[in-house]
Image: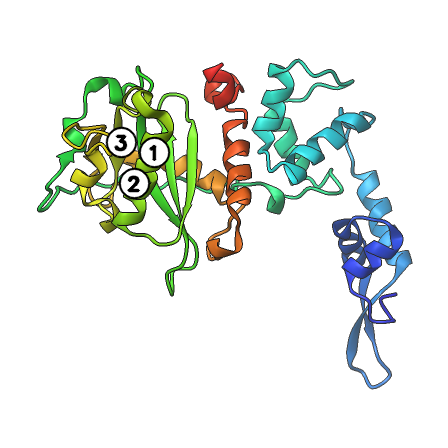
């Protein structure tokens, strides 16, 4: 099939195999041969691939713990590839929900297996975050200039300690930077990590106000209990703090307190930033948000609110609220 010009994906489809399995076999069996005119070509040779396989088998150490537990392998592959789980979330959920398999492995062992290529269908490329990616150190805080609203420094202590439900962080997730287009308005609750996501046609103050007005109408008198404060960055779409704070139902009343993080200090909205990474598992940077329907966005929100989190003993935000 290679000689016929078929690509690996086409070969995998015809053989009923995973594309990555076929790619590995082609890589193992590809040899460099000399032509009659003394030039060289690369060609697949099954015998060469078999020799590599046999040699790798001789170098193996003790048998793998997971080797005969096919149900566990299928579960792990389904969660990482199908459900976009991290390895830690997979193992943590197994323990939290007391799921029964023949074998028990820890997160570190699972990462090691993925590094070693033990799984036919999983590599490090399938992981949601690069394993070795280091966090950037916090840089010094920059002071606000011409700030009209309240600074993050004025937030009550219960916001910082996450001791009370109802304190949110708000941000916009953009698609293609050139040419504007739809964006996501993302609200992340600090205590339970609850997520609310809206698709907005434009990144404007009017669009943001419209969504907060919708939430106030939706929750009515309960809005002030659910939304006690919102912390935002200094983006132009958030600068009209008066329209964000003013109640639609009772214009003379302040419906929520809005606080502004310091410029270029994204770590001050760490909950927002971490949850935005979860959104990027479904909407990669550079993708057009116009291509995603409201139903797509609702599915992403549902997935995030049901994702097992280590900080909660691998319970989800929805489970924490129950």
Report the front residue among 232 and 271: 232
Report the front residue among 60 and 69: 69
Sequence-first disc among 1 and 3: 3
Q: Residues within 10 Å of mark 1 (few under 14, many from 20)?
A: some
Which residue bears the numbered disc 3? 230
Describe the element under mark 2 as helix, strand or loop: helix
Q: Residue at x 52, y 51 (%)?
A: 292
Distance of label 1 from label 3 (alpha carbons): 13 Å
Residue 159's place in the image compared with 78, above or below, is above
Count of numbered badges drawn on the protein = 3
- Image quarter where the N terminus lies is bottom right
Marking on residue 270: 1
**Camera-side mark, 1 or 3:** 3
Q: Position of residue 139 (x, y in %)?
A: 24, 41
Distance of label 1 from label 2 (alpha carbons): 7 Å
State the image quarter where residue 169 is shown.
top left
């Amino acid at each position: 099939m290679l000689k016929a010009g078929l690509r690996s994906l086409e070969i995998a489809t015809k053989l009923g195999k995973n594309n990555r399995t076929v790619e590995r076999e082609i890589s193992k069996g590809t040899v460099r041969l000399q032509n009659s005119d003394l030039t060289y070509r690369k060609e697949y040779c099954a015998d060469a691939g078999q020799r590599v396989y046999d040699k790798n088998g001789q170098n193996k150490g003790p048998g793998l713990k997971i080797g005969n537990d096919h149900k566990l392998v299928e579960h792990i592959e389904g969660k990482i590839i199908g459900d976009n789980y991290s390895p830690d979330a997979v193992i943590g959920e197994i323990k939290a929900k007391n799921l029964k398999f023949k074998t028990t492995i820890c997160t570190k062992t699972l990462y090691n297996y993925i590094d070693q290529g033990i799984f036919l269908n999983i590599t490090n490329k399938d992981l949601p975050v690069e394993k070795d990616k280091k966090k950037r150190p916090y840089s010094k805080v920059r002071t606000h200039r011409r700030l009209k609203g309240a600074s993050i420094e004025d937030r009550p202590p219960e916001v910082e300690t996450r001791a009370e439900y109802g304190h949110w962080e708000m941000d916009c997730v953009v698609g293609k930077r050139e040419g504007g287009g739809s964006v996501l308005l993302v609200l992340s609750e600090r205590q339970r990590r609850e997520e609310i996501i809206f698709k907005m046609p434009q990144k404007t103050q009017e669009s943001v106000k419209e969504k907060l007005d919708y939430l106030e109408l939706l929750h009515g008198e309960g809005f002030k209990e659910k939304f006690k404060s919102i912390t935002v960055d200094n983006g132009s779409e958030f600068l009209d703090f008066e329209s964000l704070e003013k109640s639609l139902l009772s214009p003379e009343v302040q419906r929520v307190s809005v606080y502004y993080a310091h410029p270029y200090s994204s770590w001050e909205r760490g909950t927002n930033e971490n949850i935005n990474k979860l959104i990027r598992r479904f909407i990669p940077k550079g993708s057009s948000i116009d291509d995603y329907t409201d139903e797509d966005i609702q599915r992403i929100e549902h997935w995030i609110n049901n994702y097992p989190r280590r900080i909660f003993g691998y319970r989800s935000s929805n489970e924490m609220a129950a």
